């Protein structure tokens, strides 16, 4: 199948529910951010130690859920087309919470903010965390702008919003966990008292 | 999602025109699909999708395939004896019919007619159909489509020899029909077939029918 279809050359795209919209439409921006997040997660996977099979499969499941969220976002709410898509299972949120708790238990307690960074895996997890936050903010704006929504759609969007919120927490903990696996200490944030000596 | 693999048996092949044939297969017991969906065959490193022509209740699966000269896969069923077994995965795709108060307009090129025939098997009626083909010999499933459509327009893209020039239909591409003949309005467009037709139709739809919805299945 050809990658380029030329159908979007004039700046418009078709939503899954059939509407023709500009590519800068809020809905397209939002699922674009989910796609961006998914791609960064793909990069993160390449930096994880091979033996961390459980984390790898966990992250691949997250990628699948993000695909599902992407298709939800490509449908105009309450348009009837949404009936074709399976709703996001709240169990996905519980899975994230369990993983967060498990990793957190293995980590030293945190007493201050940390600087995003460390090893490649951790640094990429931090990037994923911030893209996830951006997607979450965009989703909230989208929902606000499209109100009032039907009850079912409201519920579904709420679950997606919670999922994204939890997912960025997951990436924060994962970043710390990756640094721990690689024996890299997190650097705590200390306020800079005076400009650094550049000499 | 990992798609399930099914075993099927080729039961027959019949040519619909010089280069297009219909291949029929047994339908695996637990295989179900929605009209508009397709199945995927694999051979070595290549994978090819074919849209199901038959209806979801039929006990055979039929495909309508354009046999491309020098194509790697499209001729395979035409040169295989009935009884041969094949594996496929599916059903794939999201090209579906959504009932609506807005007039449905189906636009196909060549074997892109396949999902619309399946819709008809599933009792979809009252649509406008534009079928882009080179000449009258490619009006596959004509009778069935005429009886289900409110308007059936074959659009002949080739200059026809004089003896065929009397054939009822539109002499020009589907895009020309869209541009010149379809009254302005709000429609549900369903486009299936060549990527070129789809890419050329969209700007016309955006300009002439801006309130419409568009559903796309590209064979590119
Ligand atoms: C979603 C989807 C659904 C599809 N459904 C159908 C279907 O129901 N029926 C059907 O016949 N095909 C269908 N196709 C196309 C099919 O999957 C193959 O691409 C096609 O049969 C060509 O395969 P091939 O291996 O013989 O040719 P290839 O070896 O892949 O191609 C050989 C050459 O032929 C050109 N070519 C490709 N298609 C055509 C064409 N239609 N006419 C002229 N030249 C062409 C290619 O550009 C290439 O240069 C579908 C494709 C997609 C993506």
Image (tube, rainbow, N blue to C red):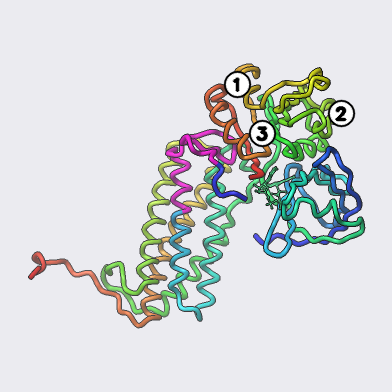
User: Label 3 belongs to which residue?
Assistant: B190
Considering depth in this image, is B152 or A155 the residue closer to the camera? B152
In this image, A30 relative to B150: left or right? left
Magenta part of the chain: A6-35
Check if mark 1 and mark 2 are on a common chain: yes
> Toward the viewer: B117 or B211?
B117
- Please state the chain letter of the residue tagged with numbered disc 1 in the rendered image: B
Q: Residue at x 46, y 78 (%)?
A: A49
Q: Is residue A78 above or below residue A37?
A: above
- Is residue A115 something that shows in the picture? yes
Percent coordinates x, y for residue B208 in the rendering: 55, 21
Mark 1 neighbour density, 10 Å: few (under 14) some (14–19) many (20 or more): some
Chain of the residue that carries numbered disc 3 in the rendered image: B
Badge 2 is on which residue? B143
Where does residue A163 sit, x and y in percent of width and height?
Answer: 49, 57
Q: CA distance from mark 1 to mark 2?
A: 26 Å
Quick one: label 3 or label 2, which is nearer the N terminus?
Answer: 2
Q: In the rendering, at what x and y percent does residue A148 appear?
A: 49, 35
Q: Which residue is mark 1?
A: B179
Q: Is residue A19 left or right of residue A183?
A: right
| Crowd band around label 2 with a 10 angstrom C-alpha radius: few (<14), some (14–19), many (20+) | few
x, y percent for residue A157: 51, 47
Query: Mark 1: which secondary structure?
Result: helix
* Residue at image location 86% in from the left, 28% down from the top: B143
């Amino acid at each position: 199948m050809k990658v380029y279809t030329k159908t979007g050359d004039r700046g418009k795209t078709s939503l899954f529910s059939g509407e023709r919209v500009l590519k800068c439409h809020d809905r397209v921006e939002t699922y674009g951010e989910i796609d961006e997040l998914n791609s960064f997660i793909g990069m993160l996977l390449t930096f994880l130690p091979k033996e961390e099979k459980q984390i790898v499969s966990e992250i691949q499941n997250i990628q699948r859920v993000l695909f599902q969220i992407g298709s939800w976002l490509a449908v105009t709410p309450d348009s009837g087309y949404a009936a074709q898509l399976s709703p996001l299972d709240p169990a996905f949120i519980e899975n994230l919470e369990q993983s967060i708790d498990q990793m957190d238990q293995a980590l030293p307690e945190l007493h201050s903010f940390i600087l995003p960074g460390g090893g490649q895996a951790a640094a990429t997890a931090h990037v994923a965390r911030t893209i996830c936050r951006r997607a979450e903010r965009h989703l909230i704006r989208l929902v606000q702008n499209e109100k009032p929504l039907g009850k079912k759609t409201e519920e579904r969007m709420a679950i997606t919003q919670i999922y994204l919120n939890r997912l960025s927490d997951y990436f924060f903990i994962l970043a710390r966990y990756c640094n721990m696996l690689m024996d890299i200490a997190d650097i705590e944030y200390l306020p800079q008292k005076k400009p650094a000596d550049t000499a | 999602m990992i798609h399930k693999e099914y075993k099927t048996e080729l039961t027959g092949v019949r040519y619909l025109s010089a280069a297009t044939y219909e291949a029929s297969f047994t339908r695996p017991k637990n295989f179900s699909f929605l009209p508009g969906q397709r199945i995927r065959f694999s051979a070595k490193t290549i994978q090819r999708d074919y849209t199901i022509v038959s209806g979801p209740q039929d006990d055979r699966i039929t495909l309508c395939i354009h046999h491309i000269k020098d194509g790697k896969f499209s001729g395979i069923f035409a040169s295989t004896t009935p009884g041969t077994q094949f594996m496929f995965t599916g059903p794939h795709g999201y090209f579906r019919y959504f009932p609506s108060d807005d007039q449905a307009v189906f636009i196909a090129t060549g074997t892109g007619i396949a999902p619309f025939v399946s819709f008809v098997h599933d009792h979809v009626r009252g649509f406008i159909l534009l079928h882009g083909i080179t000449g009258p010999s490619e009006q596959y499933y004509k009778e069935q489509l005429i009886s289900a459509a409110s308007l059936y327009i074959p659009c002949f893209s080739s200059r026809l020899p004089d003896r065929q020039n009397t054939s009822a239909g539109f002499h020009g591409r589907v895009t020309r029909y869209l541009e010149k003949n379809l009254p302005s309005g709000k429609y549900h467009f369903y486009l299936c077939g060549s990527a070129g037709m789809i890419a050329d139709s969209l700007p016309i739809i955006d300009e002439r029918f801006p309130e419409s919805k568009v559903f796309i299945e590209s064979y590119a």
